[in-house]
Amino acid sequence: MIKLRLILALLFVSASTLSLFAQDLPPEITATGNQGYCPGTPINIVTSVSITDPDIADTTLNEIFIQISEGYVAGFDNLTLAGVHPNIIADWQPAQGQLVLNGPATFAEFEAAILDIEFSTTQTVFTSNRSFSINLGNANYLPSTDHYYFYVSNPGISWQSARDAAAAQLYFGLQGYLVTITTPEESQLAGEQASGTGWIGASDEGAEGVWRWVTGPEAGIQFWQGAVNGTSVNNEFSLWNNNEPNQSGNEDYAHIVSPTLTNAIPGSWNDLAASGNPDPNNPFHPQGYIVEFGGLPGDPDINLSAATIIRMPQTSITDAEGCEGDEFTLTLTTNTDEVIWYDGPSSPNVVNIGNSYTATLNETTIFWISARFMGCTAGGRMPLTVTINPTPESNDITIQQCDDASADGISVFNLEIYSGLIANANTTNIVNFFEDSQFTIPINASSYTNTSNNQIVYARVLNPTSGCFAIAEITLSVSLPAIENFELSICDDEEEDGFTEFNLSDLDDEILIGLPVTAQTSFFPTFNDALLNINQLSNTYTNTMPNNEIIFVKVTDGLACLGVFEVNLEVKPLPELLPDETVIYCLDTFPSKIILDSGIVNAVPNNFYYNWSTQETTIQIEVNEPGIYWVDVTEVGGCTNRRNIEVLPSSIAEFDNIDVIDGIENNIVTVNVLGNGDYEFSLTSENGPFQDLNIFEDVRSGIQTVYVRDKNGCGVVSESFPVIGFPKFFTPNGDSNNDFWTIDGFNEEFLANSRVQIFNRHGKLMTELSTQNPIWDGRYNGNLMPSDDYWFLVSLQDGRTFTRHFALKR
C-alpha cells in the first residue's frame, strides 16, 4: 500500500449541511498531471483541468480545495498561486498542506487558477512522491480509497448515537457510516487530524477481545484479537495507543485518542465505555465522530475530486566498504531518467553516468550522485561513500629450524610463535597458515612438518573487524643436526632425595662459546619441544627424575635455530652421615669431656675433609660444654654434607625439701629437687620402679627413703624421712603380737626432741614416751591396766601436735 502523508483539515459540519447535497447534482472535475520534479524549480501541479456541472445553469463555485494529499513534508513543501486572478484569493494553510481558492468565480476562472498553482519544496533528499487532490465539495477526499470524510463535532455524544447519526447522513447520494480505518492513509486523514477524541466504527461488544469493524463495507471483519498484548488478525491494519486496549471497565468501543493526551501516538486508538468519560475536561470525554462516505452498495459515482501526482526524484544509495585494491561495483536504484556521478559536491568533473559504476579503489572515496528527470538541468547531489580499510601490515620471514639426527632437511616447526613477527606486532589481527597462496590447504601451525628444505608456506594476516587481509611468505629452512652434548652437575640439597634446583644459565658460557654474541639459549624437556618452542623450562629448574635427567638446549640467533643439544643433569650425592643427634653432658663431671663424631657411614673417614664449628678439622672432637655443634664433611673433589650435634646439659638431682602430710589415713609425700636434669622418683629402691610425678600418696608410716634418678644418666640420689603413724589398738598379752604400743617413725634420728603422753579416759597420765623410751607395755607403776580406750598427745619437734585415742585389749 502506498504510504500516504495526507494532512487534511477535517471540516466541522452538521447533518443539515450534508443533507443539502442530496437535493442537487454535484459539479464534476477532471485533471491530468504526472510530471517529474526538477529540484529547486517550481512546477505546476496539473497539465490540464476541466470543471463541469450537469446543471448547465450552474457555472460558478464559491471555493476549491487543493491539498498535498500524499507525501506532504511540513516546513518544506509549499503551494502558491501564480499569475493574476482578480476574482480568486488563495489561502495557503501549511498545517494541513492545503491551498484554498476562495471565490466566487466561474468554472473557467477556477480552471485558469488551478493551471497556475505551483508546487515547490526546499527538501533535497526525497523518499516519496507528492499526490494532490483538488476538491470541489467541502468534504475531504482521499484518492487511495476514493472515499470522502467529515469530522462532526458533538462533545459528549455516545458511541451508539454517533453510529446512528453517521448512518443518517448523505453526501451527494453517498451513504454515511461511522469511519472504518483500514489503511495508514486513512489513519493519517481520519486520525491524526481529528480535533479531539472521535468515535470510529470498531467494537468488541459481541465477544470480549474480538475487535471487529461493525460499520461500513468492512462490517463483520475482525482485525484484532485480545487486549493490550493481543495480535493483529490476518495482518489487518490497527493503531492502538500504548497499553491499549485495556478493558478498563466494560470498554467495548474504539475511538481516536485526544491529541492532548500525554505521550499519545498521533491518530492512535483506545477502548472506551459507550459514553466515554463524563468529565468534559477529561481527555477521554468524546468530542465527536468521523463520518465516511463511499464503498457501500448503491452509492452513485461522483467526481467531486481529481488527483494528480508529481514524481519526486527518489534515489536509494547504499554506501560500500572494502579493502585496498578491491574492485567495487556500486549500484543504486532510482525513479529518475538520468544519473550522473561527480567527484565532489560542486565539482563539474563527471566520473560516471548510469545506475552502476565499477572501480578499483585504494582509499576512501566519496562520489556525489545527481539523479534527475529528463529535462532537468540541475539537481541536488547525494553522497555515496566507499570506505577503504587498509591492508594489514605483514612481514615475509625465514624460519631456520634445527634438523634431527636423520639430517634429511625435514623438521617440525611451530609457526604460531612467529605470528607476532609476521603481523608486525599487531595483537588484534589473526594469522592463519596455509601451504598455498590461495588458502585452500590449511596448516597445523603448532606442529607442522615441512615437505622439503626451504619450503615456502603462506600466512594470511586478517583484520577481524574489516575483513581485510595480507599475504606473507614464510620460508622454512632446516639447518644441520647438532652433535655436541653438555653436562651440568650439582650436589644434592639437604633433603638428599636426588632432586635439587639447577641454574641452567650456568651452561651458557660453555654452550655459546664461538657463537654470535646475539645467540641465546632456551631449555626444553624433549627434543620435539625444542623444535616447536613449547614447554620451555625456566632457567631455575628442579629436575623431575631423581639423580639423572636428560633435557635439551636450543640455541637460536633471532629466527635461526643454530642447534639443539642434549644436556645431562646430574644430582651428585652428599657424603653419607649419621643423622643429626642430641647428646647429654653431665655437669657434675666437669671438666671431663665427651667425644663428638662426624658420623661417616659406609666410607673411609680419612677420605674426607672436616670443618667443625669449633674450627677443628679432625674426624672427632672432645667437648665439655653444652651447646650446638656442627661439622661440614666434604668428599675429596665432591660434595659437602653437614651433621648437627646438640649437647644438652644435665646433672644429678639435689634435694630441696620433702613435704610430708602424715598422721592421717592417706599419708602424702611431695619430693622437691633442684638441678638441670630430667628426673624420676621411687620409694622402693634405687632400681625403681620410678615415676615421673614427684608426689606419692597413701605412703606407709615409718622411716621411708626416696630415690631420685636423672633420666639422662647423670646418677641417683636418695634421702630418708619419717612418716608418722598411730596404731589403733594393741594386745599386751605376751604372745609377741602387738604386745607394745608405739608411734611409727618415732626414732632418735628424726624425732629426738619429740614426746608422747598417754592418758586413761579419766585424764590420768599413764606414761610418757621418748626416743629413749619409745614403747608402752600396758602397765602403770608395774600394774596391768585394764582393757579400755586410752588417749595420747604427741608433740613433735617441728611444732605439730596430735591428739588421738587407741584401744588396749586383753
Image (tube, helix red, strand yellow):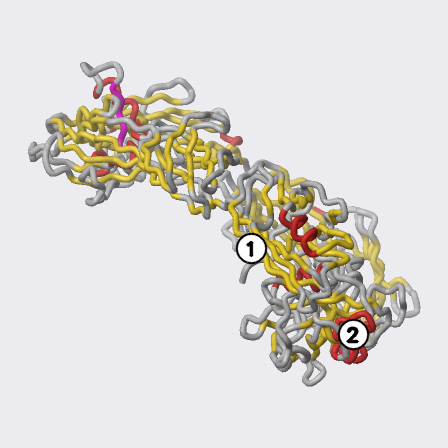
In the depicted view, which residue is nearer to us: 131 or 808? 131
Q: Which amino acid does label 1 sit on?
A: Thr
Question: Is label 2 in a helix, a strand or a loop?
Answer: helix
Residue 521 belongs to the span the image colors magenta:
yes
Q: What element carries label 1?
A: strand
Q: Name the residue under label 1.
A: 32
Quarter residue 332 falls in: top left
Tell me: residue 759, above or below residue 41. Answer: below
Residue 805, given in percent of the width and then of the height, sits at 82, 67
Residues drawn in magenta: 519-523
Q: Position of residue 411 (x, y in %)?
A: 14, 36
**Residue that carries the numbered disc 2 in the rendered image:** 19
Q: Is residue 681 above or below residue 39?
A: below
Q: Which residue lies furthest to the bottom in this view?
A: 206
Q: Please tell me which residue is depicted at 63% across the width and 81% down the height of the picture.
A: 298
Q: Does the magenta stretch include residue 511?
A: no
> On the picture, is 430 further left or further right than 725?
left
